[in-house]
Structure formats: structure tokens, C-alpha cells
Image (tube, rainbow, N blue to C red):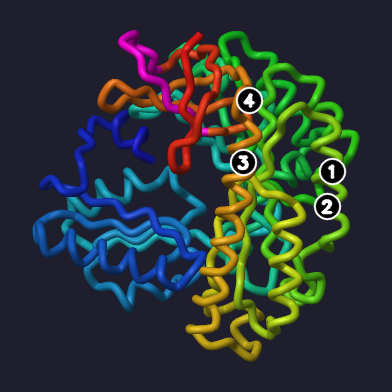
Amino acid sequence: MMDLFYQSGYDVVHCDDEADVYVVNSCTVTSSGDKKARQALRRFKRANPDAVVALTGCFPQAFPDVDKQIPEADVITGSYNRAGIVSAVRRALETGERVIEITPHKKGESFEKMAVKKFSERTRAFVKIEDGCDRYCTYCIIPKARGPVRSKQMAELREELRDLAANGYKEVVLVGINLSSYGRDLENTRLIDAVRLACSVDGIERVRLGSLEPELLTGEDIQTLASLPKFCPQFHLSLQSGCDATLKRMNRHYDSAEYLRIVQDIRTAFDNPSITTDIMVGFPGETEEEFAQSLAFAERVGLAKAHVFPYSVREGTAAARMPQLGGEVKQQRAAEMARLTDRTRRAFLETQLGRTEEVLFETEQDGYYHGYTKNYTPVLVKSEEALCGQIKCVKIESIVEEKCLGKLL
């Protein structure tokens, strides 16, 4: 969307600067996301009452009556027709009237044609290839907010990847709402085909995947990925819980045994892979015993990193109607799970000591360059040579807080 505004002649400024137009691209995974969107809209309107303030994204798509709740929004659009944001804003600027355009999702809709050739101040490019989800986890509003599964055509993907390579990007991350479902709406196309295509583009030296639904990753896929030299062996496999009873109430489509088997297949196929995940605690009905099972499973997997968060009630989902746990219990469990995954994180970083790895450097501060290995281990290197945007061999020597310190070879 930022690119669309650039192409239409707008200058894009920092959100703390005065502007003629403010755009809030909302998330509605949790109710706190809705609250933050409302707060941002009100802050921008107070800062510049004459500006056009636009709300877009998942919040209005999932809850289309939001216009009655937020009079500060001069423009309201959803997550479906993102390409229409510029014309909606222009109409509000020209007429002074409120513009509300929330296009409902419909069965059989196609992937919206949007591409980015350049990202500001990044060495990695994020390439969205899939949208929508039909998994209907009981805690999740995303199927309502993002609609059915739809995929970017391979020809469009090839063109976008070539443009990114021409603009100097060495690494691309293929992402989607339910990335593992990529290609299900296309003929004879699957996620593995998109990965092969990305790895074949000259100039792209690394290919990484976003979050994956674990049970959709087959043993054959894992072997194929391991045969691609450009593929980065970092797998973000969404776990949510290590307890089978909790997973069933969540309507997840795997159990802990299947998850562990997939992790073991990855570790057999790849040298030095990393497994990262998301873990939810305090889901409705989660007993002390179930939480203990989840803790034990997280430790057994040996996660390189985990995003741990307490369950948050999301209006409009099945889980919102289930018996809820108290906030204090959820916070205590989140803290305990975070302590455990911090230990597994430290243990993973210790396995990287002494290794020589290729690092793509992204930023610099106080003479230290920060980058990532192929398995997404963060590495700091002291250097007088400018390293941003370069891939260099580094020997990892020590651990400093959550990062590794290395020596440039």
C-alpha cells in the first residue's frame, strides 16, 4: 500500500510527522489489536484535525460496523481491496465526505495483484504469495477477516522475484496467511513449487519461509527443501500447545506426536536447522495438568525460539463462548513458559558456538554489524568494513544476551 501511494505521487513520512493523510493498517487477531488501531486513529486526528485519517486491514473486514464506533476515521476499507486505498483517500480529500468501502470476501475470489519492488532500509524482501485461511481454529477470527485460500500465480511471482533481485535483494521470505496451503486453488501447484522457483532466480541467494501449519509439510517436501542449496533451514512451525487435549479444543489439525515426527524429519534432513514457534497458554479449559504437558513438550522439542502469549478472548470465535481462565493464571503460565523457552533458546545458541556460518548483514550500530545466519541465528560482528547487504563467513565465538558474537573470516 505504501508503494501505491509512492506511485501516485505522495510523499511518505514518519507517523510522528505532520501529514495530510494517515493510514492505519489494522490487525484484529486480538481485541488489543483493535484497541491499538482505535488509539492510533484518535491520536492522528488530534494531531491534525484537517487530515484525512484512514482505517484499513483486518479490523474493519472482520467487523464491518466499525464505522459506527470510530467517527475519527474519514476512510474505512478492509483487507480485500487493498489496491483501492489510494482512490478512496483521494475521494475523501477532494470531496470532504466520508468514504466507507468494505468489500465482502466471496468464494472463488482470486489473489489480489499487488507487488513490491523495493522495501525501505531492508536487505530481505517479504513476498506475499498466499492469502486467506479455512482452518477455523476455535480461537481465530482470521478466516472471517481474510477470506478463502487464494494464491499468487507463478508467472506473477517470477516477475516480482526478478524485480527484487534486480534491486539488490539477496534474501526473500515467502509469506502467507496460511502459507502451507499455497497453490491449492491453482492447477498442479504447491508451496514446494514456489520455493523451487524462488531458488532458481539469479541474484536471490537465500530463500526463507514464513510461518507454517506443521501437518501440511510432508516428508517428501522436507527432503526436496533439503536438496535446494539456497533454502534456509529455519522452520517456524506453529505449535500453539503441546497438549493433545488442548489442541483438540483449539481445532488444530495435528497432535503432539505428529508435530514431533515432523521436527525429527527436519533434523534428519538438514544440517543445523532451527525450529521456532508460537505457544499459547491459558486457553479455555486448560488445566494445570494440560499446561504441564505443554511445558514438557516444548522442552522436549528443544525450540530455538518461541513467541509465548496468553490466550486473549476474540469476539466472534468459538473459543470466546467457552469457560475462560482468570487473567492472573494466564499471566503466570505465560511467564513460566517464557522462562522455559528462554532456556531452550540459550541451549540452541550454545550449539552454534564454534561453527562457521554465512551471515547476511542488515544493520550497523556503534561499529557492530548485525545479521542472520541461514537458520536465523542473530550474529554481531565488529568491523571497520561496511557489511550491510553483504553475505560473509563468520566464526561464532560467544553469546551476548540473545545474540551470538562472531569473528569475520
2 or 4: tag closer to the N-terminus: 4
- Residue 390 in picture, x, y percent from top left: 46, 13
Q: CA distance from mark 2 to mark 1?
A: 6 Å
As shown in the figure, which amino acid type bears the numbered disc 1?
Answer: Gln
**Residue depicted at 34% across the width and 11% down the height:** 386
The residue that disc 3 covers is 210
Which segment is the magenta one?
Answer: 378-388
Circle 1 or circle 3, nearest the eye: 1
For residue 127, which quarter of the picture? top right
**Residue depicted at 69% across the width and 24% down the height:** 231
Residue 63 left/right relative to 207: left
As shown in the figure, which amino acid type bears the numbered disc 2?
Answer: Leu
4 or 1: tag closer to the N-terminus: 4
For residue 60, which quarter of the picture? bottom left
Circle 2 or circle 4, nearest the eye: 2
The residue that disc 4 covers is 207
Q: Describe the element under mark 4 as helix, strand or loop.
A: strand
Query: Mark 1 Cα within 10 Å, few/some/many (few <14, many 20+)?
Result: few
**In the rendering, which numbered label is found on residue 260?**
2
The residue that disc 1 covers is 264
Residue 9 left/right relative to 361: left
Q: CA distance from mark 3 to mark 4?
A: 10 Å
Marks 1 and 3 close (CB-CB < 8 Å): no
1 or 3: tag closer to the N-terminus: 3
Marks 3 and 4 close (CB-CB < 8 Å): no
